[in-house]
Amino acid sequence: MGTISLTGLRARGYHGVLEQERAAGQTFHVDLELDLDIAQAAATDDVAATVNYAEVAAVVENIITGPPVNLIETLAVTMADSILTEFSRITSVRVTVNKPQAPIPADFANVAVTVSRDRIAAGR
C-alpha cells in the first residue's frame, strides 16, 4: 500500500451560509491523501497502474467551482465520495477542505474540515 498526497489545491468557489460569501466567492484550499496499492505501478513504472493525480485534482476543482453549498462539510464529503466513485484503485481517501477567508470576527489562520472515506465502508 501507499499514499499519494496532493496538498494546497486551490480554486475559487461560492460556498457558504452567508449571502456575501455566495456573492463574492473565496478561494478554498484542499488537501488529499489517497490510499492505494502502488506495488504494480512501482514495479512497472507505468502510470496506468496508479492514479493520475491530475485527474483527481480536476474532479476536486470541478466540485469547488460547481454549484454552491452551505457547508465545507458538504464539500468535503462530496469530494471524498466522488473520488472513490471515479477512481477504483483508491481504497480510502482523506479530504481536508480549508476555508482561510471564512467570515469569522476573530484573528485566525484557517478553518478546516477533514473527512475520511473507505471503499469498503462506502460499499463501493
Image: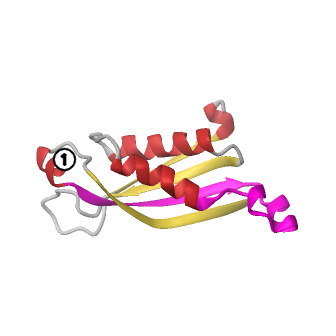
Question: Split into 4 quadrants, where in the image is the C terminus?
Answer: top right
Q: Amino acid at mark 1?
A: Arg
**Nearer to the camera, 108 or 3:** 3
Q: Is residue 66 above or below residue 56?
A: above
Indicate the quadrant where residue 121 lies.
top right
Which residue is identified by label 1? 22
Q: Residue at x 12, y 44 (%)?
A: 19
Q: Is residue 2 magenta?
A: no
The secondary element bearing badge 1 is classed as helix
Indicate the quadrant where residue 122 lies.
top right
Q: Residue at x 28, y 69 (%)?
A: 109
Q: Residue at x 69, y 46 (%)?
A: 91
* First to last magenta residue range: 25-53
**Relative image position of residue 50 (x, y in whole percent):** 73, 57
**Relative image position of residue 47 (x, y in whole percent):** 74, 62
**Relative image position of residue 57 (x, y in whole percent):** 51, 57
**Relative image position of residue 40 (x, y in whole percent):** 84, 59
Q: Residue furthest right?
A: 43
Q: Residues within 10 Å of mark 1 (few under 14, many from 20)?
A: some
**In the image, is 66 to the left or to the right of 92?**
left
Q: Residue at x 60, y 38 (%)?
A: 85
**In the image, is 61 to the left or to the right of 56?**
left
Q: How many marks?
A: 1
